[in-house]
Image: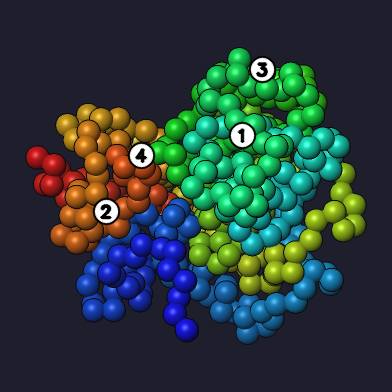
């Protein structure tokens, strides 16, 4: 049997990692400034993370949600305190797409309404409801089409209100910062306007923080830069540092009932341990502050770079829009300079490194960048 070939693959196979360093099977050394799509939040093979997962696996790796699991309660308490949503409730799942599916379902249950408003260029996942709310017809099968999804341009409150006036909207879903689109931010005015319109028209405000959350932008969630409070927040990626876990935090006004949501693997013992280890490291090593500091350094060094048409993002969620297609430059960064970077569209390089990245590592990347773009 062969693999179902849906991924274009680099001819590189990492076999070992430590913090922001990767080694491939041939012993070549790379610096990881992409973190596997923003997943590696506290560095590869962090000793505390490895120790906690190893010890938990020796005790118990898995049991279902039919029994008590105190690790889930520990995670809910810690997460609430650190992220500032202490009065909210946590539901655990396995991925970002699942988190968004469950958030949309909760909003629909609570409001009794069916429609969802999403935004142009949005990406919310590849499962059925999440991909329907994603503005990319190329990844939507005919099965995914739904009359219950509407789209509006980002940062256009008049367009949002024009849709919401049509009625029957359960939720508005928006990314804290659009990632796949190329690092586009909703403005503070726009987010506050969404909050007001959701209250006015009786729908839930869902903040998708799957890529932009967990300290990446210099606040725990990107929307907290603008002091906006959501009804539901979704998260995944950096939550488990590579161990699959996702979650949604849900406003206390939304009531749960048995069977309303469910999952076999979500919130299992290893997943919760991974998430608790991540929070330990984020707190103990002051990584949210580090993300803000190193992000400011990247911006100071690259914002006026002649190869960069526009510098976008916050903290360590960075988009570098180039004046020409990035493929040649990205290939040279990888194969000549040994830096992993990401992409968003034909002109944008994305940097999503671990929150542990040092200024020395950031400086080495900037030197490599400038040597290729001069």
Q: Residues within 10 Å of mark 3 (few under 14, many from 20)?
A: few
**Which of pointers 3 and 1 lies earlier in the amino acid sequence?**
1
Residue 162 has which mark?
A: 3
Q: Which mark is residue 118?
A: 1
Q: Which residue is mark 4?
A: 319
Dot in front, 3 or 2: 3
Residues tagged 3 and 2 counted as in contact (Cβ below 8 A): no
For the point 25% across and 30% down, the residue is: 309
Q: Are marks 4 and 1 in contact (CB under 8 Å)?
A: no
Q: Is residue 297 visible?
A: no
Q: Quadrant of residue 266?
A: bottom right
Q: What's the distance in space between the residues labelled 4 and 1, CA to CA? A: 22 Å
Which element carries disc 3, helix, strand or loop? helix
Identify the disc placed on residue 361.
2
Measured from the top left, where is residue 320 in percent x and y? 30, 38
Q: Quadrant of the C terminus?
A: top left
Question: Which residue occupies the foreground of this view, 261 or 285?
Answer: 261
Q: Is residue 49 visible?
A: yes
Looking at the image, residue 130 lies above or below residue 114:
below
Q: CA distance from mark 1 to mark 2?
A: 37 Å
User: What SS does tag 2 mark?
Assistant: helix
Of the two numbered discs 4 and 2 on the same chain, state the one appearing first in sequence.
4
In this view, the residue farthest toward the top is: 158
Give the foreground label among 1 and 2. Answer: 1
Foreground mark, 4 or 1?
A: 1
Q: Nearer the viewer, residue 111 or 136?
A: 136
């Amino acid at each position: 049997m062969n693999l179902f070939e849906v991924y274009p693959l680099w001819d590189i196979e990492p076999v070992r990692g430590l913090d922001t360093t990767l080694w491939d099977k041939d012993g070549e050394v790379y610096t990881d400034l992409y973190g596997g799509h923003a997943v590696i939040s506290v560095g590869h093979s962090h000793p505390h993370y490895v120790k906690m997962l190893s010890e938990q696996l020796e005790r118990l790796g898995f049991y279902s949600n039919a029994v008590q699991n105190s690790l889930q309660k520990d995670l809910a308490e810690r997460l609430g305190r650190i992220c500032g949503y202490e009065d909210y409730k946590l539901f655990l799942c396995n991925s970002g797409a699942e988190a968004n599916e469950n958030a949309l379902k909760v909003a629909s249950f609570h409001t009794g309404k069916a429609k969802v408003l999403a935004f142009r260029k949005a990406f919310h996942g590849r499962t059925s409801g999440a991909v329907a709310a994603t503005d990319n017809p190329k990844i939507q099968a005919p099965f995914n089409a739904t009359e219950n999804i509407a789209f509006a341009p980002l940062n256009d409150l008049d367009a949002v209100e024009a849709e919401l006036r049509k009625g029957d909207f359960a939720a508005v879903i928006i990314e804290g910062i659009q990632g796949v689109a190329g690092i586009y931010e909703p403005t503070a005015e726009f987010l506050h306007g969404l909050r007001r319109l959701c209250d006015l028209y009786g729908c839930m405000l869902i903040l998708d923080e799957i890529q932009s959350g967990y300290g990446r932008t210099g606040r725990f969630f990107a929307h907290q830069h603008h002091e906006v409070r959501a009804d539901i927040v979704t998260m995944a990626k950096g939550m488990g540092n590579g161990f699959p876990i996702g979650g949604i935090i849900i406003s206390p006004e939304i009531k749960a009932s048995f069977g309303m949501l469910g999952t076999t693997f979500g919130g299992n013992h290893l997943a919760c341990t991974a998430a608790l280890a991540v929070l330990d490291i984020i707190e103990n090593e002051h990584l949210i502050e580090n993300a803000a500091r190193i992000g400011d350094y990247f911006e100071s060094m690259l914002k006026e770079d002649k190869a960069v048409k526009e510098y976008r993002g916050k903290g360590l969620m960075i988009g570098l829009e180039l004046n020409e297609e990035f493929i040649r430059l990205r290939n040279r960064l990888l194969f000549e300079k040994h830096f992993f970077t990401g992409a968003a569209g034909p002109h944008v390089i994305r940097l999503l490194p671990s929150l542990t990245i040092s200024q020395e590592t950031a400086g080495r990347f900037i030197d490599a960048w400038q040597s290729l773009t001069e």
